[in-house]
Structures are given as structure tokens and as C-alpha cells.
Image (spheres, helix red, strand yellow):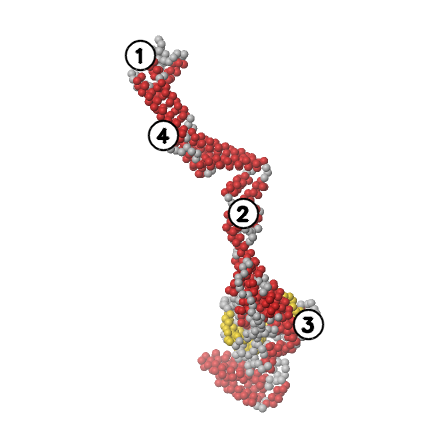
């Protein structure tokens, strides 16, 4: 019923989640590549792209199945973990009970901390795994964990991080576990198959979300920051509102800046920079007048030196030359008898003209020139005129007033008028003055204007030269620079009007706002590519955001919480109460109750039953410990698979009754799964041996100690963990041959320490034989009960036995106890040890056979 309900519920979820559920059921855990595929599928679904994928879940997918059985075998090759440096593997044996004991500082907690990290213990109890903080050597953290998986040997090489998936089922209890269910809620570690499936599906959601978040974080924005001076502009406001919904048309509209906009920007900057718009308007109009004057002057020169005008001047010059030639020919006839040369030349004509003017205006005022009446004199030399002179004067005047000379004169006058009408060309210095006055700074215009003026001057000079026809060929059309200056003049006019308008209105704030908007528009145009990339970035983020909505695990958590109410909470609470009873702590008024459901996790907490105080404030340290153990066992025993339990000093702070109850419960658990106990308490060791024997389990006892090279070293010669006969055999077969070799090869000085160690071991062995064999194990150290049924075995003891054992104790106590400085102790030689070992073995074998 539950399975069919879940399958129906899944069909109503997003498609990618249905695919995830199907693949989880098919393959178990999903690797990183599978998570990436699901992320892509989630993004496609967010974009309404639904690929054709089979999402159907086969019937019976949630049926229970057998779990794997794990048995922890050994830990070896440890480095970089606390001070652990064992040279011998920590072997847990094949028994379902293993007890690792050692004194304080021997390395027990180091092993437990290592297992927490390898097995993936809860974060709240795992803690940090330090290296040897007292060592300057920096070594890599590593260890080898050997275990059986369904009977097959497996080895895991741990390299300082990560967990072993096979060993995640191992549960570890130590002092820190007491914090798990106390004070804050903690999730129960046991989950039925269906709830485990939901947990894994929620984990898939979290992993896909994490990948989407990683992709989102990788999409870093490259949008440049807005300059401070345009933050509050229209463009700045638009940038702040950029989103994935911003269209391409909107982008083009805000990120375009034309040449017209640039001109407007420049003009506006100039307008705002002016403190007195009225004065600026006058200045601009002055610039305009100078610009117009320059254009007028140059254009006038261009017009008057046009090809048409120049052609007319050239024609007039040619005509004048012809007329002059005709007049000169006529003069040759008139002046052929002249006594002086060049009579009739231009110079002579000027002299004649001056004489006429003098005669008519001064000498013979009112008389016609030349005055050749009686008593007339020459107006030049004042000599009386002879008849010949009078005739010569009269012929000269007739020539001058003749038609040929008249035409020549008129033609020459026409040429002079045309040349005099030619304009004066600006000098380069005058041109520069006018350009500066017009405020023209464009170097291209300045150069072109100089070229034009120089060309005009050359053209005028050529017209005045004898071969004036060379003046033609130079264009007289208006050059482009004049049109540019006309545009500048027009700009001056517009600027002047705006400055005049500014002078009439107080609109500086409005202009500054408009300038800021233009600047922002220009900045946006310059950054258009970056803004387009930012839009792509925002659109990618939006798609990831929509995809993340599909990975929300709230629905999964809610559904899991509903199922967990029935499948976990009641059963968990019942198991807790049963464990309290088994541990003889049912009288404690505590209860385990559900605190909340978070992301599908049913959280529980320990509380006082009938009081609101914190558990730690009311219960004793021992009561807190026994309640924690009950909660731990209730948590982990709900599982259907056989995973090992690891306990670190479980009886710490417990009294004798609780101690025995805990050991009895742990031994009972060992009938179904491996139980590993780390302790420094010999009483716990004895209790484990006694209760394990009752259920026919031979516990594996390992003693560890600190050696000069580090802690955690297993010791195979511990009296507390082995039977007397076993220790005696090891002394005979292992230690005696080794001591003999040292004696022979290294001498007495080195042998002394070895011999003393053998004395200590042998004396302690004799004590153990007295307790376990001679006194029949009736009373045992660290054990509560007395085996009174074995009292009859005391009848086997003879006076000889007592004397023999007393002699051994006396002999070896003398070797072990401190001696006077004046006495030199000579320890037994190897042969003497061998004699005592063999004699004790023979006595022990015989004593055990006595009736």
C-alpha cells in the first residue's frame, strides 16, 4: 500500500526528479557524472524542454532486500593521526567481541577518532583529526583498514580525507555521543528502505542544487561599474534595472550615441562651463563676424580672380599691346627726323603731357597747346620757338591727338582699370590674425586656407606678368574649407542664440541634468558589448534560478516526514524504552520524543519526563551516560543489517550495577554483530570475558601501549588478557630463546635489562596462577561475584604446593623489588630461567589433572 502510494506520488513530481528516482533504484548511489546529467535535464525542464525519457518505476522497487554484512578485521599502516605509530597491525580477530585495552595515553582514543573519520560519523561527534602536535615532522595522514564484506576480505586505503562507503554503517559511541540527542534534535540513523530512498533522493536534490549554485557562481559578472558622475542619470537608472527580461530593442535604444549626440554633448558642456552667457553670446557673435569676414574676403578674391575675369584682363592686355604697336608705327613716321632717340616713347609721352598741362594751365592759360604764336617760347626750355620748332611742336601734338594714339591710350587705360580692380590678397600674417579672431582651431582648415591664399597671390602675380596667360589653370571655385567655416559660422549663430536664451532663463540645473543624461548615453554606447554580456549573464542566472526551483526538496521532505511518523518515531521510542529497561535504568524519568521534521529528517531529542529542565542540569554524569547509551542502542539496533559497533570506554562514570548491565547488553548484541570495545578498565575486561563465556563467545583481547616511537602498539604478552598456560608457553618458546641470544651475542650488560623484564613477567604470572589456578578463580580482581561453587577445588592444594609457590614468589620478588645501592643484583642466567619455566609448567599441568 505504501509502495503504490509513493509510486503514484512520484508521477506528480518534476520529470527530472522522476528520472532521478528511477536511476537511484536502478544503480543505487549516483556518481558525479550522473548528477551532472540530471542537472542538465533539470535545466531543460525549466526551459519547458521535455525530452522523451522513460520515467516509469518497476513494481516492487521498494521491497526489502538483504543487506551486506561487515566485520572489521584490522587497522594498520597508520601515519599522521595523533601520536599513533604502531608497527604491528591492530588485529580485531574473527570473534564478534574484541576488547582493546591500555592505560591512559596508550592510543585508544586515537584509534576511535580515526574510525570516526573513516566511517563517516556524525559531524557533531566526529571532531577534527590532528596530527602529532608535539612533532615538528609534517607527515601525510593515512591508514589501511581491513574488513570482511559478506565474508570476502577487503582493504581500504584512507588518505586523510573522505569516508569508506562500505564502513559507513559502523556506529561509534564515545563521550561525545552524549551531545547527540541532548539539547538539540538529532536525526535517527536507522531508516526503513522507503525512507532511505527519500533521503537519497533529497541528497540528489541537494547535489543538483549545489551544481547549479556552482554554475551560478562561475558566471561572474563583468559589468563595469557606473561612473559616479552618472549614477543618478537616466542611463544609470536603466542600468540598475537591467534584468533577464531586458530586450535587444531596449538595449539598442539606450546604448546608441550618434555624431549629432556628440556635437550636442560638446556644445552643452561649453554652455554649462560659461559663467556669463550674455558675454559668451557676444564673444561667439564676434567669432562669427570674423569667420564671415574671412569667408567674404577670400570669396571676393576668388570671384575677382575667377577664370572669366582673368580671361577678360588677358584679352584687354593683348588688345592694348596691339594698339600700342600701331601707335608706335605711326610715331616712327612722325618722329623720324627727331634729333633725339625714343621720341614718341611712353616716357616722352609723359613729358609731353606734362608740358601740355603746364602750358594750358600756367604759361599760356586759356591758349591751345602748343602755343606757337609770335614771341612764343618753349614751355620746357623757355627758348623762342623757331619756325622749324613751331612745325615740330604742331606735328607732335597732331600725333598725340591722332586716332591711332588715342586708341592706344584708351586701351592702356582699360587694362589699368581692370588691374586696379583686382583685390589685395591677404598676407599669411593677416590670414592668421583673422583665423585666430574667428576662433578656428581646425588645423586642416588652417592649412587649406593658407594654400588658397598662397594660390590666389600666385595667380594675381601671374596676371601682372608679361605672360599673364599662365595665370589660368588654377581653380577659382570655392574650396571645401570655406564651406566648413560657413558651418562653423552657423554653429556660432546657434550657440549665440542658446547663450542668449541661457542669459534670459535660469536653466542651468536643467542643462546639467541633460548633460548628465548625454554622458550616460555615451558611456552606455561605449560599454554596449559589456552590457550585452551582462544581459547574457543575467539570463543564464535566471535560467539556473528557474532550474533550482525544480530541485526544491520541500515536497520530498514533507512526504518523508509523513511516512516517518509511522515508520520511525513510535518504533524508535519503544526501542529506547526497552534499552533503558535492559540497562536497568527504567527508573530514570526521561523520554525520547520527536522534536521536528527538517528536510525529511525526523529529529528526536531526550527530555526529562514531567519537568522542563535540561537533562544535563538534573541527571548525574553516570545517569547521562546510561541514557546516552540507551539512545545510541535504540538508534542503531533498529537497522536490519549487521554492522559493527565501536564503544570507547562505555562504562566511564557508571557504578557497578550499570557497568554490568552495559557489558551484559553488549555481549548480547555480539551474538548478531561485531562489538569492539576500547577501555582502560580491567574490571570491564573481566566482565566481558565472564559474560562472553556465558554465550559461548571467546573475546579477542588486545593490549596496546605507548612505545618510544609512538602510541597504539599492540603488546602480545599482557598477563591480564591471557591464560597462565598460554603465557608460560610464550615464555618458554619465545622469550627464553630471545634472552639466550642476547646473553651470548651482546653480553651481560645488555642482558641485564632483558633478564629483569623476564623476572617481572614471571613473578606476575605466578600471581595470576595463584588467583586463577591455585585458588580456582573463586575470587577475581575487578569482579563483583564470587564463584562459591568452586570452593571444593581448594582441597587439591597440598603443603608442598604452598611451599613451592612461596619459594617462586620470594625468589622473583627479590629480583623485581628495589635493592640496596650496596648490593649488586645478579639476575638469573638463561639456563636458570629455563629450569624455573619448565618446572612451573610441569607443576601446573599436574595440578590441573588432580582430582
Helix, strand or loop status at disc 1: helix
Of the two numbered discs 3 and 2 on the same chain, state the one appearing first in sequence.
2
Q: Distance between the residues labelled 3 and 2?
A: 73 Å
Task: Name the residue located 55 percent from the left edge and 37 percent from the top edge.
Answer: 498
Q: Nearer the viewer, mark 1 or mark 4?
A: 4
Q: In which quarter of the image is residue 618?
A: bottom right
Above or below 362: residue 614: below
Q: Distance between the residues labelled 1 and 4?
A: 47 Å
Above or below 625: residue 473: above
Of the two numbered discs 3 and 4 on the same chain, state the one appearing first in sequence.
4
Q: Distance between the residues labelled 3 and 4?
A: 132 Å
Name the residue beneath numbered marker 3.
Answer: 589
Quadrant of the rendering where the C terminus is positioned: bottom right
Helix, strand or loop status at disc 4: helix
Of the two numbered discs 1 and 3 on the same chain, state the one appearing first in sequence.
1
Name the residue beneath numbered marker 1.
Answer: 388
Near-viewer residue (546 or 421): 546
Name the residue beneath numbered marker 4.
Answer: 469
- Work out whether residue 206 can be spotted: no
Q: How crowded is mark 3: few (under 14 residues within 10 Å), some or many (20 or more)?
A: few
Name the residue beneath numbered marker 2.
Answer: 254
The percent coordinates of residue 380 (x first, y second) are: 35, 15
Q: Distance between the residues labelled 1 and 3?
A: 174 Å
Amino acid at each position: 500500500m505504501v509502495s503504490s502510494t509513493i509510486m503514484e506520488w512520484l508521477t506528480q513530481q518534476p520529470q527530472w526528479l522522476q528520472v532521478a528516482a528511477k536511476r537511484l533504484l536502478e544503480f543505487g548511489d549516483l556518481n558525479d557524472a550522473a548528477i551532472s546529467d540530471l542537472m542538465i535535464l533539470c535545466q531543460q525542464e525549466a526551459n519547458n524542454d521535455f525530452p522523451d525519457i522513460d520515467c516509469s518505476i518497476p513494481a516492487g522497487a521498494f521491497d526489502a532486500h538483504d543487506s551486506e554484512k561487515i566485520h572489521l578485521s584490522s587497522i594498520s599502516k597508520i601515519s599522521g593521526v595523533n601520536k599513533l605509530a604502531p608497527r604491528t597491525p591492530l588485529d580485531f580477530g574473527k570473534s564478534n567481541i574484541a576488547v582493546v585495552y591500555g592505560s591512559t595515553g596508550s592510543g585508544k582514543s586515537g584509534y576511535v577518532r580515526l574510525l570516526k573519520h573513516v566511517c563517516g560519523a556524525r559531524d557533531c561527534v566526529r571532531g577534527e583529526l590532528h596530527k602529532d602536535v608535539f612533532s615538528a615532522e609534517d607527515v601525510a595522514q593515512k591508514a589501511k583498514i581491513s574488513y570482511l564484506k559478506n565474508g570476502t576480505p577487503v582493504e581500504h586505503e584512507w588518505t586523510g580525507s573522505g569516508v569508506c562507503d562500505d564502513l559507513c554503517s559502523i556506529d561509534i559511541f564515545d563521550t561525545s555521543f552524549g551531545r547527540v540527542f541532548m539539547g538539540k534534535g538529532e536525526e535517527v540513523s536507522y531508516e526503513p528502505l522507503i525512507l532511505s530512498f527519500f533521503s537519497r533522493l533529497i541528497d540528489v536534490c541537494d547535489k543538483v542544487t549545489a551544481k547549479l549554485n556552482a554554475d551560478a557562481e562561475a558566471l561572474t559578472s563583468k559589468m563595469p561599474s557606473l561612473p559616479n558622475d552618472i549614477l543618478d542619470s537616466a542611463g544609470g537608472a536603466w542600468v540598475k534595472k537591467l534584468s533577464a527580461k531586458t530586450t535587444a530593442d531596449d538595449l539598442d535604444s539606450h546604448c546608441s550615441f550618434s555624431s549629432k549626440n556628440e556635437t550636442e554633448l560638446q556644445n552643452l558642456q561649453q554652455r554649462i562651463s560659461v559663467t556669463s552667457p550674455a558675454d559668451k553670446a557676444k564673444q561667439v557673435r564676434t567669432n562669427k563676424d570674423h569667420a564671415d569676414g574671412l569667408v567674404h574676403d577670400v570669396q571676393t578674391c576668388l570671384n575677382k580672380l575667377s577664370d572669366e575675369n582673368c580671361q577678360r584682363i588677358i584679352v584687354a592686355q593683348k588688345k592694348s599691346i596691339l594698339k600700342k604697336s600701331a601707335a608706335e608705327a605711326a610715331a616712327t613716321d612722325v618722329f623720324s627726323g627727331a634729333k633725339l632717340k625714343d621720341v614718341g616713347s611712353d616716357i616722352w609721352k609723359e613729358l609731353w603731357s606734362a608740358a601740355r598741362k603746364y602750358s594750358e594751365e600756367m604759361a599760356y592759360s586759356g591758349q591751345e597747346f602748343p602755343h606757337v604764336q609770335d614771341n612764343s617760347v618753349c614751355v620746357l626750355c623757355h627758348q623762342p620757338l623757331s619756325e622749324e620748332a613751331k612745325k615740330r611742336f604742331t606735328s607732335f601734338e597732331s600725333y598725340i591727338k591722332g586716332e591711332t594714339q588715342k586708341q592706344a591710350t584708351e586701351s592702356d587705360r582699360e587694362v589699368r582699370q581692370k588691374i586696379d580692380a583686382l583685390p589685395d590678397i591677404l598676407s599669411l600674417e593677416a590670414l592668421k590674425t583673422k583665423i585666430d579672431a574667428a576662433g578656428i582651431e581646425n588645423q586642416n582648415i588652417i592649412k587649406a586656407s593658407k594654400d588658397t591664399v598662397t594660390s590666389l597671390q600666385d595667380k594675381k602675380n601671374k596676371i601682372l606678368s608679361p605672360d599673364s596667360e599662365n595665370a589660368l589653370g588654377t581653380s577659382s571655385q570655392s574650396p571645401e574649407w570655406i564651406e566648413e567655416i560657413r558651418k562653423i559660422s552657423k554653429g556660432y549663430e546657434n550657440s549665440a542664440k542658446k547663450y542668449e536664451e541661457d542669459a534670459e532663463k535660469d536653466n542651468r540645473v536643467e542643462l546639467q541634468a541633460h548633460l548628465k543624461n548625454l554622458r550616460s548615453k555615451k558611456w552606455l554606447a561605449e560599454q554596449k558589448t559589456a552590457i550585452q554580456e551582462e544581459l547574457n549573464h543575467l539570463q543564464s542566472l535566471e535560467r539556473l534560478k528557474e532550474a533550482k526551483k525544480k530541485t526544491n526538496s520541500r515536497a520530498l521532505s514533507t512526504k518523508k516526514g509523513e511516512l516517518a511518523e509511522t515508520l520511525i518515531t513510535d518504533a524508535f521510542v519503544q526501542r529506547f524504552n526497552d534499552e533503558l529497561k535492559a540497562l536497568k535504568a527504567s527508573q530514570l524519568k526521561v523520554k525520547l520524543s520527536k522534536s521536528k521534521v527538517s528536510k525529511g529528517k525526523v529529529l528526536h531529542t531526550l527530555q526529562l519526563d514531567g519537568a522542563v529542565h535540561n537533562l544535563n542540569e538534573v541527571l548525574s554524569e553516570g545517569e547521562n551516560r546510561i541514557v546516552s547509551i540507551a539512545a545510541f542502542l535504540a538508534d542503531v539496533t533498529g537497522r536490519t543489517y549487521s554492522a559493527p559497533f565501536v564503544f570507547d570506554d562505555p562504562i566511564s562514570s557508571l557504578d557497578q550495577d550499570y557497568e554490568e548491565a552495559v557489558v551484559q547488553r553488549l555481549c548480547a548484541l555480539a551474538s548478531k554483530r561485531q562489538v569492539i570495545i576500547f577501555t582502560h578498565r580491567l574490571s570491564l575486561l573481566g566482565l566481558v570475558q565472564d559474560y562472553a563465556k556465558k554465550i559461548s563467545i571467546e573475546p579477542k583481547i588486545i593490549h596496546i601501549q605507548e612505545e618510544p616511537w609512538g602510541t597504539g602498539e599492540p603488546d602480545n604478552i599482557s598477563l591480564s588478557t591471557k591464560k597462565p598456560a598460554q603465557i608460560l608457553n610464550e615464555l618458554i618458546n619465545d622469550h627464553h630463546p630471545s634472552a639466550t641470544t642476547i646473553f651470548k651475542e651482546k653480553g651481560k650488560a645488555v642482558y641485564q635489562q632483558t633478564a629483569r623484564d623476564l623476572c617481572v613477567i614471571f613473578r606476575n604470572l605466578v600471581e595470576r596462577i595463584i588467583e586463577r589456578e591455585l585458588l580456582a578463580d573463586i575470587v577475581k580482581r575487578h569482579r563483583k561475584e564470587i564463584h562459591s561453587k568452586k570452593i571444593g577445588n581448594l582441597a587439591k592444594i597440598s603443603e608442598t604446593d604452598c611451599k613451592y609457590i612461596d619459594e617462586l614468589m620470594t625468589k622473583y620478588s627479590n629480583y623485581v623489588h628495589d635493592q640496596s645501592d650496596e648490593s649488586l643484583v645478579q639476575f638469573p642466567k638463561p639456563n636458570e630461567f629455563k629450569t624455573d619455566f619448565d618446572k612451573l609448567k610441569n607443576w601446573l599441568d599436574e595440578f590441573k589433572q588432580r582430582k
